[in-house]
Image (cartoon, helix red, strand yellow):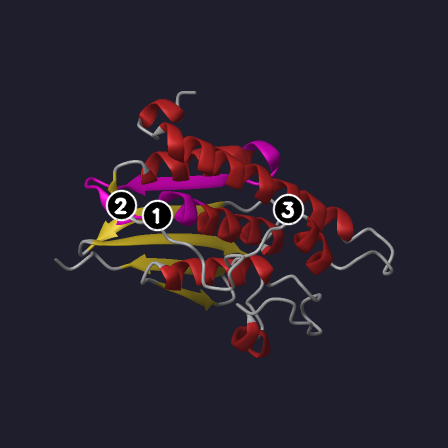
Amino acid sequence: DCLLSRGLGDVYKRQVMISLVMRHILFSAKITARQQPHDMPPLRDHLQLLNISPRKRSGGGIVIERSQTEDLGAALWLISTELQIVTPDQPIQMTVELPAPVFCDVARISQLFSNLSENAVTHGASGKPIKSAARLVDDDFVLTVANSGDRIPEDLLPTLFMPFEHTSNRPSGEGLGLFIAIEIAKGQGGTLTVASNDLETVFAFRLPKLQT
């Protein structure tokens, strides 16, 4: 409640909470699926049953509804706090420095952030903090999510944002969250990049200020 009182509007409260619930269901299902027999239905089938898709039913791209808002910081704080609750053994650190409104789709950026955060929890070093930050840099909105752990293999980078790609380093279907994240980034006119070394992996979403 204290986070919701920071100014997150009623409409966005519902959108963000629905997104959170569905992401947490999928996150829990993904972990559980690793312990299931190989003849279990693939993740793709579960997503179709839940009618979860990064595309509109008409076949177009992700629906983006941008507006000038001061709600983004509160939404990201909410997601970070909720993720810490469901992963109590993984430190989650969040920094928000947004002194001005951001022209964006709060619900979609919240989904992007949730996907990146859960990816960091899944692949980051156990017990090491996940460090996230939302800032205005040269008037652009910049969101970063960093985790400690092994470097992403070079051969995985070209297909990192592709869904249902199977390699020796990643089970089939594990790229869905990152695929949705980059589609959201592109849909808002932004970019999503990754940098990985032996110390940490950092995903960075940058949304340029709307030129008027």
Q: What residue type is labelled 3?
A: Phe
Residue 179 is situated, as x and y percent measured from the top left of the image, at 53, 63
In the picture of the structure, the residue carrying the numbered disc 3 is 27
Q: Of the residues shown, which amino acid type is indicated by label 2? A: Ser
Name the secondary structure under disc 3.
Answer: helix
Secondary structure state at the residue bearing disc 2:
strand
- Whichever of callouts 2 and 3 sits on the residue coming sooner in the sequence is 3
Contact between marks 2 and 3 (CB within 8 A): the answer is: no
What residue sits 38% from the left and 61% below the top? Answer: 187
Q: Residue 105 carries which label?
A: 1
Residue 67 has which mark? 2
In the rendered view, tell whether residue 144 sits above or below residue 186: above
* Residue 128 shows in the view: yes
Q: Is residue 166 magenta?
A: no
Between the C-alphas of marks 1 and 3, the distance is 23 Å
Residue found at the far front of this picture: 58
Mark 2 and mark 3: Cα distance apart in space = 29 Å
Q: Are marks 2 and 1 in contact (CB under 8 Å)?
A: yes
Q: What stretch is highlighted in magenta?
A: 85-110
Mark 2 and mark 1 lie on one chain; the one further toward the N terminus is 2
Locate residue 34: give its quadrant.
Answer: bottom right
For the C terminus, the quadrant is bottom left
Task: Please indicate whether residue 76 sits to the left or right of residue 39 in the image.
Answer: left
Query: Residue 134, position in %: x, y?
Result: 33, 47
Q: In this view, does 28 lie to the left or right of 67?
A: right
**Nearer to me, 33 or 21:** 21
Q: In which quarter of the image is the N terminus?
A: top left
Q: In this view, does 185 lie above or below 5?
A: below
Residue 86: say if magenta.
yes
